Image (cartoon, helix red, strand yellow):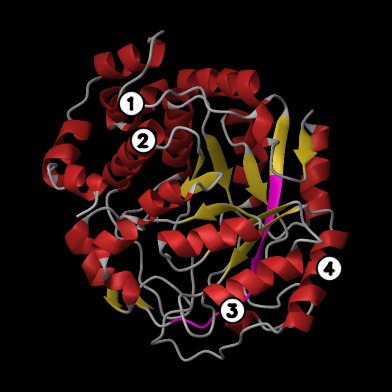
Amino acid sequence: MSDFYSILSQHSWDDIKESIYAKTLVDAKHALHKKEFRTLEDFKALISPAAESLLEEMAQVSRQLTLNRFGNTVQMYVPLYLSNECQNICTYCGFSLHNKIKRTTLTDAQIIKEAEVIKALGYDHVLLVTGEANKAVGVEYLQHSIRLLKPYFANISIEVQPLEQEEYELLIAEGLYAVLVYQETYHEEEYKTHHTKGRKSNYEYRIDTPERLGRAGIHKIGLGCLIGLEDWRTDSFYTAMHLDYLEKKYWQTRYSVSFPRLRPAEGILEPKSVMTDKQLVQLICAYRIFKEDIELSISTRENASFRNNIFRLGITSMSAGSKTNPGGYAVFPEKESLEQFEIDDKRSATEIAEMLKLNGYEAVWKDWDKSLMQPKFTSS
């Protein structure tokens, strides 16, 4: 049993949920105006229904904290889907094994073709994405893909199946910079209903993944939950608790949090918990106020209008011009039936960069220099 899973087992989902919804306006004001270190109890108050009336003030505080820490910059990244092969059955994903879609895994020539197009768009930071299929896209395939892409990009991240510590160490040696691994939902029983087949059905193994990454010495770990599977406030609290634990134990690693909301895809379920745009703003601001150094990312799942405003309030990283199907940029640009989910903001990278410029912000095309972004935490 992993250390964090042991900690998690000591908490009742229902009790945590009740404590969040019991927070008062006084609690929320106290958390917002606190000058010293904010706790997980403060985070509960900031994401509670009681804090909704403080959203304007939260947004102002979040904006100032973000400007103080990151300046008028937004980091740009783009996903490069290598494969939609997957051995898991997940109720919310277009790549799920039970969906009868055409499967493909990019060859060397196709990967290079995609890289050339993405590089021409201006990107220097690429996120490699695959389904979870150890045979088709195992460690050797990922290792080889990183080698192919290193001449094109300064920063290479992955969002793939969870791996063993020694496998992560191999990829880090090849130049892997960051790993995104979302727990989807921290509600263990609900998790099992959405992951019925494949390695992903092992809740404890997945939740231990950031721990293995920390031990492997990865530069950055990306966390998050899939908003819509369960009560978003409770899931977000558990994500924050996971983040807090990791920061204290693996203090030399950087961290990011993403906010994926369920989007339409082939054969998936309707959200159990619907989050409004206003509530997503509240959550983003709550994270910034709770953790001033954390990188907060928003993807093209969200619409253009929302993304045109949210970067001012705490977001530090955005994707643009994303394709969620393998080969979507150059190899199979018209085959949307291969996609993992539908995107909403379809603007190009150039259009997003221009939008940022018009608002006095600068688009940063590679990940920030690690030497300039050292966390302020100490080991415990």
Q: Which residue is mark 4?
A: 117
Looking at the image, is mark 2 or mark 3 nearer the viewer?
2
The residue at the far top in this view is: 35
Which label number is shown at residue 170? none
Residue tagged 2 = 249
The residue mark sitting in front, 4 or 2, is: 2
Query: With 249 as the anchor, is 321 left or right in this view?
Result: right
Q: Is residue 127 above or below residue 233?
A: below
| Residue matched to label 1 | 380
Rendered image quadrant of residue 233: top left
Provide residue 230's location: percent of width, then percent of height: 28, 55
Amino acid type of disc 2? Lys
Label 3 sits on what residue type?
Answer: Ser
Check disc 3 and report the residue beneath it. 83
Residue 102 sits above or below residue 46 on the image: below
- Residue 96 position within the rendered picture, expressed as x and y whole percent measured from the top left: 42, 80
Q: Nearer the viewer, residue 361 or 81?
A: 81
The magenta segment = 76-86
Q: Earlier in the sequence, mark 2 or mark 1?
A: 2
- Quote the CA–CA distance across marks 2 and 1: 6 Å
Residue drawn at 60 percent across, 77 percent down = 141
Q: Residues within 10 Å of mark 2 (few under 14, many from 20)?
A: some
Residue count near mark 3 (Cα–Cα under 10 Å), binned few <14, some 14–19, many ≥20: many
- Which of the two labelled residues, at mark 4 and mark 2, occupies the earlier sequence position? 4
Q: Amino acid at mark 4?
A: Val
Q: Secondary structure at mark 3?
A: loop
Disc 1 crowd, CA 10 A, few/some/many (<14, 14-19, 20+): few
